[in-house]
Image: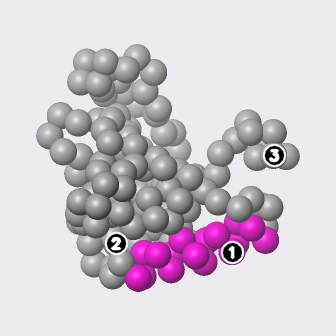
Amino acid sequence: MSIEQNRWSVVGGQWVEPDETLSSGESLIRQFLIARDFYSKNLKIKDVHIAWSPDVFTGHPVTLAKIYAGCGIQNYVFSRSEPEGKKVFWWESKDGSRILAYKIPGHYNPTYGKLPDYIDTWINTTNYDKPMITIGKGD
């Protein structure tokens, strides 16, 4: 299996994509616990280290880095509501826990004609020349 060969990383960590600002901290943690059980039984992996929130339309709570780091998340990929001009950054909570946050160029379902512009803007903002682009449609 590609997961066992480290050719593919399971991304997400949660059972569903919750509304992070309306959910309680306990509810967010339970999302990880339920997902961890599923991943263990069905994919034979213990932990997922990359959180995935492609459509967070209400923003991100200040407690998110602490909660995610406490659930074993090291990296966070999202598509909305980044701090001004920051596309890749260490998101650190007041207690010092932190996760590496990555804002997807453009959006999770970019307009293909505008993709070169999204990539150029992302590269010029971050100085990283290899942006991750998501392709496909969901739901």
Q: Which residues are magenta?
A: 26-41
Residue at the image position 33 percent from the left and 70 percent from the top: 20
Which residue sits at x=70%, y=41%? 8
Q: Quadrant of residue 17?
A: bottom left
Find disc 2 in the rendering and name its residue.
19
87 part of magenta stretch: no
How packed mark 3 is, by other alpha carbons closer than 10 Å (few <14, some 14-19, many 20 or more), is: few
The residues tagged by marks 2 and 3 sit, at their Cα atoms, a distance apart of 31 Å
Magenta stretch containing residue 39, yes or no? Answer: yes
Of residues 17 and 23, the one nearer the viewer is 23
Checking the image for residue 37, the label placed there is 1
Residue 4: mark: 3
Could you say whether the residue bearing mark 3 is in a helix, strand or loop? loop
Residue at (81% x, 39% y) in the render: 5
Is residue 57 among what the camera can see? Answer: no
State the image coordinates of residue 100 (x, y, percent, origin top left): 39, 43
Crowding around mark 1 (Cα neighbors within 10 Å: few <14, some 14 to 19, many 20+) is some
| Inter-mark Cα distance, 3 to 1 | 18 Å
**Label 2: few (<14), some or many (≥20) within 10 Å?**
some
Q: Is residue 4 rendered to the left or right of residue 54?
A: right
Q: CA distance from mark 1 to mark 2?
A: 21 Å
